Amino acid sequence: MKSLAIQNLSKTYFDPYAGANVTAIHDISLHVKQGEFVSIVGPSGCGKTTLLNMLAGFIPPSGGSIMIDDKPVKGPGADRGVVFQTFALFPWKTVLENVGFGPCMRGLPKSECDNIAREFLSLVGLEHAADRYPNELSGGMQQRVGVVRALANNPDVLLMDEPFASVDAQTRMTLQEELTRIWQERRPTILFITHDVAESVFLADRVVVLSKGRVLEDMPIALERPRAWEHLIEDDTFKALSAQVLHKVRSA
Amino acid sequence: MRLLQHIWSIYLRVTSKFPALRSFVPFIPLLIAWTLVTELAIFPRAFLPGPVDVVNAFGTLTYKGVLTQYLEDSVIRLAVGAAFGIALGIPLGVLVGLSDRVRQAVWPLLLFFQAIGDIAWLPILLVWFGFSLTTMTLVIVYTVLFPIVLNTSLGVRSVSTDLHRAALSLGASKLRVVWEVVLPGALPNIMTGLRNGLGYGWRALIATEIIVGTSGIGFMMFDARRAGSVVEILLGMVVLGTLVCGRQLGTCAHRTRDW
């Protein structure tokens, strides 16, 4: 049972422009169970991207610890997959090669990598685009590839850094619904960073509100699954929860 | 007016069927002008031979095997120098591009030595190594090196951080990130560096052959000056122009995937 334990995490760095130390994360403790979908939401500058970068291992923490199943996290690795706001697909590789990248890095033979890639591409209905290049795809399609590329590597945790912020609103809603569908099918552990309050409530089991580097609230979301925008947009519970989160985010 | 339009439409139709023609047509007026100037003897024939004389010289020298030998010598020298330059330049460029510390330590030095320029090294290389193949090769390596290093490091730095991080989070080791992400990402810039480097290298080669020369196209042109044989000088120039220009036109038609 892989669980993610964040204990008293802090991050301070020296800002050359301010000429002083800046504390981005003060003291964050969080526990995420296997298969949970947690949204992290907060105003700009609250430290959510810093938090994700530390979880992914891209930057080292200043204090505290991050453990996956009691094993400390040191640097980036295949156990923590990342989905980027900028998609970050490799432009010189085909869609199939992109999605098969993770298995390839593990040393699997090419045919095996291709099979895994096709399996995951069919999850999002993109098998027909397997031999296309990323610049031939729309933004929504590119991010779908980004998501399955991370999933194909079977990470312990999927870290998503405002992944739908770069796509248009309609596509965003479609992608959100697709993400919940994939999650229900495969049950990965997901940490979803966003600044969009409604998105955070729509997607998650739990919403963590961050502000100025601290956890303000850790709220369970008691909405039924599967979740669809057409129903929830009129649903009273959804509206109440969104209002609660918004209030908390703004109160900071 | 109608006649010009008619001619233009014929030109477009023919060149769309034979695109290579587009490269040759602009030279026709030049050749015509050249022939006219020589036939009208505006300059003494000995100073400016006509195109026919140059073609004859081309035929004679190729027949004697001189031109082919000289061409071979020049090209081999360039190839050897370029090979060393590339083998040194690309890794150095990658290192400078990836490591901020290396870059800060090395960048001003690179700019300074690039500014000195290849030919300025010739006197001291002649002192150290004499009129030898080593001297010539070193000049070419030096000339080819800098465009490659500078362009490669530029290309490496242009690869976005997110791409690095994506590869790392998919389980690639730092070395594999260089191979799978940094090098392909920097490739367009590396190609630019190669093209520039080879262009400068070729020119430096000709200049070096003139000074150090025992054989080669540059030597041929300079030696012909002493013999008073202007035809061979012109022939050398035409050969140079065609070789370098032909390569450039080839690369233009070359498929470049834009990424």
Image (cartoon, coloured by chain):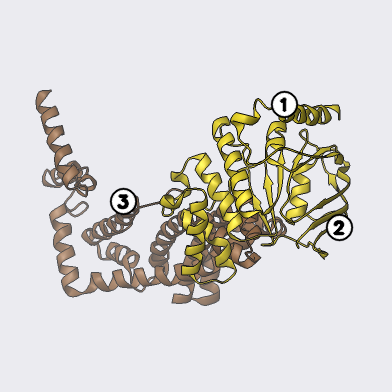
Q: Chain drawn brown, letter?
A: B
Is residue B92 visible to us here?
Answer: no
Q: Residue at x 85, y 46 (%)?
A: A14
Q: Amino acid at mark 3?
A: Ala
Going by the picture, which residue comes out furthest to the front? Answer: A224
Pointer 1 residue:
A236
Which label lies toward us, 2 or 3?
2
* A149 sits left or right of A50 in the view: left
Q: Is mark 2 in CB contact (under 8 Å) with mark 3?
A: no
Dividing the picture into quadrants, the one containing residue A102 is bottom right
Q: Residue at x 42, y 65 (%)?
A: B208
Q: Specify the label residue B148 is tagged with.
A: none
Going by the picture, which residue comes out furthest to the left? Answer: B3
Q: Chain of mark 1?
A: A
Q: Position of residue B189 (x, y in %)?
A: 50, 53
Q: Chain of mark 3?
A: B
Q: CA distance from mark 2 to mark 3?
A: 56 Å
Pointer 3 residue:
B253
Q: CA distance from mark 3 to mark 1?
A: 63 Å
Chain A shade in the render: yellow
Q: Amino acid at mark 2?
A: Ser
Pointer 2 residue:
A65
Q: CA distance from mark 1 to mark 2?
A: 39 Å
Q: Quadrant of the C terminus of chain A?
A: top right
Which label lies toward us, 3 or 1?
1
Q: In terms of sequence position, does the residue under pointer 1 or pointer 2 come before the other?
A: 2
